[in-house]
Image: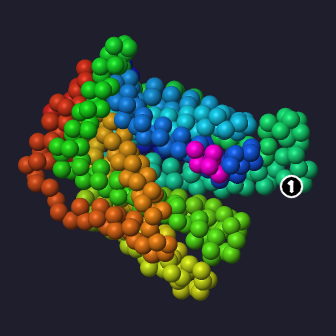
């Protein structure tokens, strides 16, 4: 058995693996819809492909989290990379609706598999090296910042690459001709992402050592995964702190969907045409990721200056809610390019992402101090699932609200309610009892590391 990595090395590798995972997906974001329509898909078919991604990710979220807790972080993270590799290739080269839908479904499976293993690996490694009292916020913040930076870079490169291929000697036309239309300029970002996915796979398999686990059997997995999932859901219902974290993630999902659905139309109104609005939206999406990165980097300082992780979550979610409410207040001015409403809208947009970025690392710091290693990835999957489900529900409700401020204010009100959950601290006695309870609930027989009953607590 090798010695565990020191916290600094573990943090650096966690940052690298976070960036390598999200950069390929960021590359495919900008040209995704345009590529599908270029292949002949109608808007309804494109929506069906996107739904295939969302439904697959939601259906597999909890089982894959349990799989990570039973089989190990590295194996599941590598499987996520393999699914994404195949998905990106199908996305780039697919020419029919069913192939593109299959690619999106595989991408959804990869998204579900990736929800938790890297972060759980980082926390497990730091705890094994420095003990359960080790500081986690800095590493979690840097991992979140790396994710945002990778998505921002991916969106910019993915949006610019097809355009660059059409300049000068028009390499895009040569690619199209040489491949009989199989590879077109809009395919290039996804193919580049597939190449980076190979690097990700190699890095995961070589740079993320884990403590040895008992040999997994099919019977053990079939028994262990459902038990771990049930225990994770029970913990969310029994622990007040974990419940607040899950509800806060749900509120954040509502806010993100509100911004992502309503911003493209508002950008088109401001610019005067859908085409120029799409360019503005791409720039705003990149700016949003950068704001989220800045908020994540600010999270440890906010927690230190604010008196702890709970206060940092309150401030972060409160700032984000204020930004969304500001966007709602300026929605009536969306058809006007007057500088004051536009400046206030930009400020609101930035606050949404800075606030969510600042709250996330502190929320997860609290979560990891409540949940033991045997159920860590499952708990992260429960958190992610709540974000996705409430976000999807908010998106459906938005379509039935009147245009203008009411649509923005819905997400703002939900996020404000999530922030208000953090105005009261839970009882100290309850906090002291939960980790032992969590260790009991989340033991599945696959657990191998020796720990005290207070594992995962400060």
- Residue at image coords 46%, 72%: 402
Q: Residues within 10 Å of mark 1 (few under 14, many from 20)?
A: few
**Residue on which the image places disc 1:** 167
Please state if 398 lies on the left or on the right of 32 as rendered. Answer: left
Q: Residue at x 38, y 45 (%)?
A: 384
The correct choice, above or below, for 323 with respect to 333 in the image is: above
Dividing the picture into quarters, in which one does residue 251 lie?
Answer: bottom left
Please tell me in which quadrant of the rendered image residue 408 appears. bottom left
Residue 44 in magenta stretch: yes
Instruction: Check disc 1 and report its element: helix, strand or loop.
Output: loop
In the figure, 100 relative to 341: above or below? above
| Residue 100 x/y as whole percent | 65, 38
What type of secondary structure mainly makes up the magenta span? helix
Q: Position of residue 282 (x, y in %)?
A: 63, 61
Give the total number of marks visible in the rendering: 1
Measuring 67% from the left and 38% from the top, which residue is drawn there? 97
Where are the magenta residues, as a range?
A: 43-48
Q: Which residue: 86% across, 35% down? A: 180
Which residue is at the far left? 429
| Residue 154 covered by magenta stretch | no
Does the rendering let one see residue 294?
no
Q: Is residue 51 visible?
A: yes
Image x and y of residue 37, in percent = 71, 49
Q: Height in image: 452 above or below 147?
A: above
Left or right of 203 in this view: 297: left
For the N terminus, give its image quadrant: top left
């Amino acid at each position: 058995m090798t010695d565990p990595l020191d916290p600094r090395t573990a943090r650096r590798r966690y940052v690298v693996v976070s960036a390598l995972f999200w950069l390929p997906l960021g590359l495919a974001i900008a040209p995704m819809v345009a590529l599908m329509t270029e292949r002949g898909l109608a808007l309804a078919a494109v929506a069906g492909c996107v739904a295939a991604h969302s439904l697959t990710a939601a259906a597999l979220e909890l089982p894959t989290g349990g799989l990570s807790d039973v089989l190990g972080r590295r194996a599941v993270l590598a499987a996520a990379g393999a699914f994404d590799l195949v998905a990106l290739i199908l996305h780039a080269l697919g020419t029919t609706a069913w192939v593109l839908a299959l690619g999106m479904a595989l991408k959804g499976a990869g998204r579900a598999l990736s929800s938790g293993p890297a972060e759980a690996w980082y926390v497990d490694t730091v705890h094994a090296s420095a003990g359960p009292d080790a500081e986690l916020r800095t590493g979690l913040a840097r991992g979140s910042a790396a994710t945002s930076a990778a998505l921002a870079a991916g969106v910019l490169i993915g949006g610019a690459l097809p355009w660059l291929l059409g300049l000068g000697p028009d390499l895009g036309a040569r690619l199209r001709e040489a491949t009989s239309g199989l590879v077109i300029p809009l395919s290039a970002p996804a193919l580049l992402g597939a190449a980076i996915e190979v690097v990700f796979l190699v890095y995961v398999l070589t740079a993320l050592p884990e403590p040895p686990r008992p040999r997994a059997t099919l019977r053990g997995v079939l028994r262990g995964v459902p038990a771990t999932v049930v225990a994770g859901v029970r913990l969310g219902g029994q622990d007040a702190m974990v419940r607040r974290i899950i509800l806060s993630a749900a509120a954040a999902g509502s806010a993100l969907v509100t911004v992502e659905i309503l911003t493209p139309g508002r950008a088109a109104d401001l610019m005067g045409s859908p085409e120029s609005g799409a360019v503005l939206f791409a720039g705003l999406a990149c700016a949003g990721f950068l704001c989220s990165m800045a908020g994540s980097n600010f999270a440890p300082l906010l927690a230190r200056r604010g008196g702890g992780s709970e206060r940092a979550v309150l401030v972060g979610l409160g700032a984000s809610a204020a930004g969304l409410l500001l966007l709602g207040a300026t929605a009536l001015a969306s058809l006007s390019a007057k500088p004051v409403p536009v400046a206030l809208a930009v400020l609101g947009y930035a606050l949404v992402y800075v606030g969510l970025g600042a709250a996330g690392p502190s929320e997860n710091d609290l979560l990891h101090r409540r949940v033991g290693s045997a159920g860590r990835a499952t708990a992260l999957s429960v958190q992610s699932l709540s974000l996705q489900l409430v976000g999807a529900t908010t998106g459906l409700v938005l379509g039935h609200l009147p245009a203008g401020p009411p649509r923005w204010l819905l997400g703002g009100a939900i996020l404000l309610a999530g922030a208000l959950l953090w105005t009261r601290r839970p009882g100290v006695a309850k906090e002291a009892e939960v980790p032992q309870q969590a260790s009991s609930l989340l033991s599945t027989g696959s657990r191998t590391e020796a720990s005290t009953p207070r594992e995962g607590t400060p």
